[in-house]
Amino acid sequence: MFLFDPTYLIFMIPAFLLMTITSIYVKSAFRKWSQVQARSRLTGYEAAQRLIARAGVYGIQIEGVRGSLTDNYDPRTKILHLSQDVSGTASVASLAVAAHEIGHAQQDAEGYLPLRFRSALVPMVNIGSYLGWILIIIGLFMSYAGMAFGVNLAWLGVAVFAGGAVFALATLPVELNASARARVLLSETGIISGPDEQRGVSNVLNAAALTYVAALVTAMLQLLYYVMLVGGLGRRRR
């Protein structure tokens, strides 16, 4: 049965290694620049307050969130969540992360189309991440049992599961744009200054962007495996 198919490992081991390496790189970049104090002496929380006014996004609340690198902006509630490592420290890394999330708030306020498209995909992805592989499993069992409709059901599962890859693809321009906005906001407000701080901000933001690239590669490899699996089953039945 495909659950124990060694071919799956051929697809997913490279993805796992890429995700692991990317995670290590992100944490290393954040740790390095967390030890470099910003000349502005502003904490991530203070910088976020100043950037909210500069970006022209009002009605945004700032709240703490547990964990490390768990910072996020929720467009549904208009709440900016900052982790303790970011909100309470005046480091170059903290400023980069806080500004990135303000970039998302700015996208939300402007009705940035890629963000709206990604948000619209969320319900489908939440359902598809569970329903997709269930349909694939049921379809495969039905096909092995001699039911011709099984292959069609499995293909439907692949199509539903593909929503995750589409979401990962849609996420890339949203995140890259938020990082670009962060760089502009930090420079225009003078919160960062000098080539060294600019380099640090870019290092942190570029490292974070790689996680979304790795997520896209992982989603595509998993989708390709299911396409190969169901496609091979259809050819055998013919």
Image (spheres, rainbow, N blue to C red):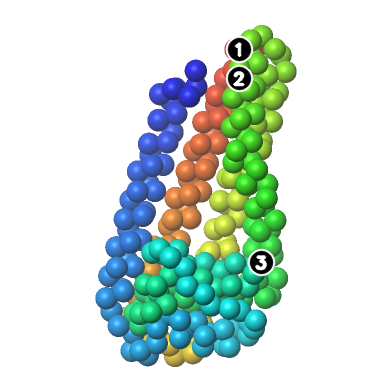
Q: Is residue 139 left or right of residue 95?
A: right
Q: Nearer the viewer, residue 170 or 27?
A: 27
Where residue 219 appears, as percent x and y from the top left, is 52, 43
Image point (35%, 80%), residue name: 89
Graded by Cα atoms within 10 Å as few (under 14), some (14 to 19) or many (20 or more), the crowding at tag 3 reads few
Separation of disc 2 and disc 1 at Cα? 6 Å
Separation of disc 3 and disc 2 at Cα? 39 Å
Residue carrying label 3? 76
Query: Which disc is residue 42 wearing?
Result: none
Name the N-terminal-most of marks 3 and 2.
Answer: 3
Q: Nearer the viewer, residue 116 or 231?
A: 116
Graded by Cα atoms within 10 Å as few (under 14), some (14 to 19) or many (20 or more), the crowding at tag 2 reads many
Q: SS class of the residue under badge 2? A: helix
Image point (55%, 26%), residue name: 228
Query: Which amino acid type corresponds to the residue marked 2 in the rendered image?
Result: Leu
Q: Of tags 3 and 2, which is closer to the observer? A: 3
Res 14 → quadrant: top left
Res 144 → quadrant: top right
Q: Is residue 26 above or below residue 237?
A: below
Query: Which amino acid type corresponds to the residue marked 3 in the rendered image?
Result: Arg
Residue carrying label 2? 140
Q: Of tags 1 and 3, which is closer to the observer? A: 3
Name the residue furthest right.
Answer: 149
Q: Is residue 11 visible?
A: yes
Image point (30%, 83%), residue name: 37
Graded by Cα atoms within 10 Å as few (under 14), some (14 to 19) or many (20 or more), the crowding at tag 1 reads some
Query: Which disc is residue 144 wearing?
Result: 1
Q: Are marks 2 and 1 in contact (CB under 8 Å)?
A: yes
Q: SS class of the residue under badge 1? A: helix
